[in-house]
Amino acid sequence: MTERNNLENPLFLFTFLLIAIILNTIASIHFLLIMLSGILFIAFYICLKKKYLYSLFFVILTFLFIEVNSGFKPLSLSLLSLFLYIFVLPKISRTVSFSSLNNYLYIIIFYIGVTIIWSLSTDINETVAKAIVLNILIDLIFLGTLL
């Protein structure tokens, strides 16, 4: 019997996507950047791995909404997620022997990619760096407690 993740439940995922959109709308006013994007990346990963294409469509739409709010180029987070899914994550899953640790590493690597994308479009100052670290901590705590 395989262990199911909450992100595999379409109702939970849709509710989470709505919450992420609302939080990012509020966060864009107060400049907290990209809240819960790491969890969205894990949802993207699960949807691609399990071939949940309808759920994947809604995850990409949520990424698009976050990108528009944050000033990223459209589909940049989706393309980053796809790149990580194809090239980086298989190497990590072969290297790391703790399967429960993988999702935490995936989130950290995703935010490293987001930081690189952010630095290509704008300058990274102390406020942006603090916000990215805060978003990583929020996503890691959320992943550990609710998923």
Image (cartoon, helix red, strand yellow):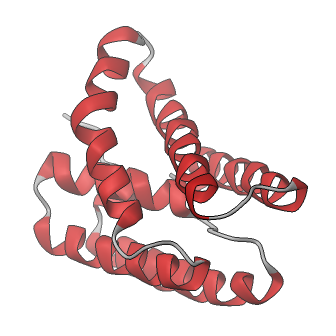
In the picture, the quarter occupied by the N terminus is top left
Residue 128 placement (x, y as % from top left): 79, 60
Residue 147 placement (x, y as % from top left): 50, 51
Q: Residue at x 36, y 57 (%)?
A: 43
Q: Residue at x 73, y 59 (%)?
A: 123
Image-quadrant location for residue 9: bottom left
Residue 87 placement (x, y as % from top left): 26, 31
Q: Residue at x 18, y 52 (%)?
A: 48
Residue 12 or residue 40, whichever sits in front: 40
Point out the residue furthest to the right here: 126
Q: Is residue 111 above or below residue 76?
A: above
How many numbered tags mark residues here?
0
Q: Is residue 66 above or below residue 89?
A: below
Q: Residue at x 18, y 45 (%)?
A: 49
Image-quadrant location for residue 12: bottom left
Residue 53 placement (x, y as % from top left): 12, 67
Residue 24 or residue 87, whichever sits in front: 87
Image-quadrant location for residue 59: bottom left
Q: Is residue 109 above or below residue 41?
A: above
